[in-house]
């Protein structure tokens, strides 16, 4: 048997086991699922030293390969991050169970009682890069929503992911849940990914989390429905009616609070009426955070007078997800122009308007075609935990069947349950 046959058999075997497990997890009680999650949270905290050691192996390899700084930052474990993982598991355990929730109910004239009820999707494949905490987030969300999942992490986090998968397996065994409800594909060979994407007989949904190249490969090669999130090209629009201090605070937070994440701002659009006085204040605050400013001609002229260094922006800069201390800036003539630019350059992720004008905010909300839109708040809140979801399986920029941060409810579909009293047609 050659290597490709071996990988095919491995991945197909995992998928078969996941499908069988999904039929069982769909029937688990809330108490059974929560017991497993509590056990997992305890195991994460009890095994902090082991997790840090395995993560150190990945970090050493990443530095040797000179991986980009943002990727290494996302890869890194620390005591606070491990505690946050455990806390996140407990938060998901405390959330209401979506399975069995009645969405709609209709009684027909013939007496048929038709109920639309939330049920698990089945088997969910999650393909991700760099961030090993995704292993935990996805596993616990899938378990709580009654799904089985197949995890395929990146090679840069292999040891961290394997260590976390072992803890998940131990929690399942301790609490008597199906042992194949969560499985990590134990190879970094890309052929394994190609094989997984063909197994639509067993796998019902693919959720990729990673760079645009990975997501496009998955979308173009999958026989299984894919929920996509290509880029996080997020924008802040500072309106002419913006409060100056709020505009500075929100822009700086959206860009610099954590630059390596998908909900960090990459573009700033500012109205021409307030730009001469307000843009230098924002730019100075950004420069204090060592942000490189890539600006259009109008912004360049304003900031030159303020002696703030800038770099000329290209058209492509406004379409770029930097994930770094770089921000593109453009002065716009109107709110309508800002909306048009965001819809042109953005990725449909998260956008913010800073304004005291409620009518302007309403127009911005109506006009911008993105999954999450903010009025007087930072884009950094686009996160499952911040939205009260406990964690997130991903952030969808698609429209079907989920959009924005995906939590427990987004990991469910529905079925119709029809109750009769002997009706025939």
Image: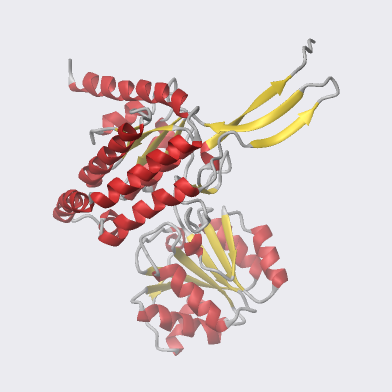
Task: For the C terminus, give its image quadrant.
Answer: top right
Q: Residue at x 50, y 33 (%)?
A: 29
The quadrant in which residue 182 appears is top left
Q: Position of residue 61 (x, y in %)?
A: 15, 50
Quarter of the image for residue 341 reads: bottom right
Give the farthest residue toward the right: 109
Asked which colour scheme the image uses, the reply is secondary structure
Which one is in front, 136 or 232?
Answer: 136
Query: Which residue is at the front of the view, 125 or 170?
Result: 170
> Looking at the figure, which quarter contains the N terminus?
top left
**Residue 388 position in % (x across, y down):** 52, 55
Q: In the displayed structure, would residue 226 be above or below residue 195?
A: below
Residue 303 vertical position relative to residue 194 in the rendered view, above or below: below
Residue at the image position 28 percent from the left and 29 percent from the top? 192
Please tell me which residue lies in front, 128 or 268: 128
Q: In this view of the protein, can residue 135 be seen by the observer?
A: no
Report the side of 391 relative to 45 (left or right).
Answer: right
Give how far across and how far down residue 158 sits, in percent.
23, 42
As displayed, is residue 50 above or below residue 104? below
């Amino acid at each position: 048997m050659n290597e490709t046959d071996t990988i095919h058999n491995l991945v197909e075997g995992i998928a078969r086991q996941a499908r069988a497990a999904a039929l069982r997890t769909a029937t688990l009680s809330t108490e059974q699922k929560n017991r497993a999650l509590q056990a997992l949270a305890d195991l994460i905290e009890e095994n902090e030293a082991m997790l840090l050691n395995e993560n150190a192996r990945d970090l050493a390899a990443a530095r040797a390969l000179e991986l980009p700084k943002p990727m290494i930052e996302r890869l890194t474990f620390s005591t606070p991050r491990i505690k946050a993982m455990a806390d996140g598991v407990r938060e998901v355990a405390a959330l209401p169970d979506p399975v069995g929730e009645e969405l709609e109910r209709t009684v027909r004239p013939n007496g048929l009682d038709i109920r639309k009820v939330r049920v698990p999707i089945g088997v969910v494949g999650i393909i991700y890069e760099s961030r090993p905490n995704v292993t935990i987030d996805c596993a616990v969300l899938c378990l709580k929503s009654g799904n089985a999942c197949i995890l395929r992490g990146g090679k840069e986090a292999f040891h961290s992911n394997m260590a976390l998968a072992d803890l998940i397996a131990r929690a399942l065994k301790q609490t008597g849940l199906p042992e194949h409800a969560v499985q990590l594909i134990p190879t970094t060979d890309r052929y394994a990914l190609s094989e997984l994407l063909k197994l639509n007989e067993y796998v019902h949904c693919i959720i990729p989390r990673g760079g645009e190249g990975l997501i496009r490969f998955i979308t173009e090669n999958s026989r299984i429905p894919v929920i996509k999130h290509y880029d996080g090209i997020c924008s802040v629009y500072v309106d002419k009616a913006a409060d100056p201090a709020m505009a500075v605070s929100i822009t700086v937070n959206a860009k610099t609070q954590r630059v390596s994440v998908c909900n960090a701002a990459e573009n700033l659009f500012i109205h021409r009426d307030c730009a001469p006085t307000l843009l230098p204040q924002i730019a100075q605050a950004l420069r204090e955070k060592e942000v490189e400013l890539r600006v259009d001609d109008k912004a360049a002229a304003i900031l030159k007078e303020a002696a703030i260094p800038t770099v000329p922006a290209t058209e492509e800069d406004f379409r770029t997800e930097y994930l770094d201390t770089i921000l593109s800036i453009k002065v716009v003539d109107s709110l309508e122009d800002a909306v048009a630019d965001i819809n042109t350059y953005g990725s449909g992720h998260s956008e913010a308007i800073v304004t005291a004008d409620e009518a302007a905010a309403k127009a911005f909300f109506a006009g911008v075609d993105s999954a999450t839109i903010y009025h007087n708040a930072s884009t950094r809140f686009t996160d499952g935990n911040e939205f009260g979801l406990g964690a997130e399986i991903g952030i969808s920029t698609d429209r079907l069947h989920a959009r924005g941060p995906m939590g427990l409810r987004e990991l469910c579909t529905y079925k119709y349950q029809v109750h009769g009293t002997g009706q025939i047609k």
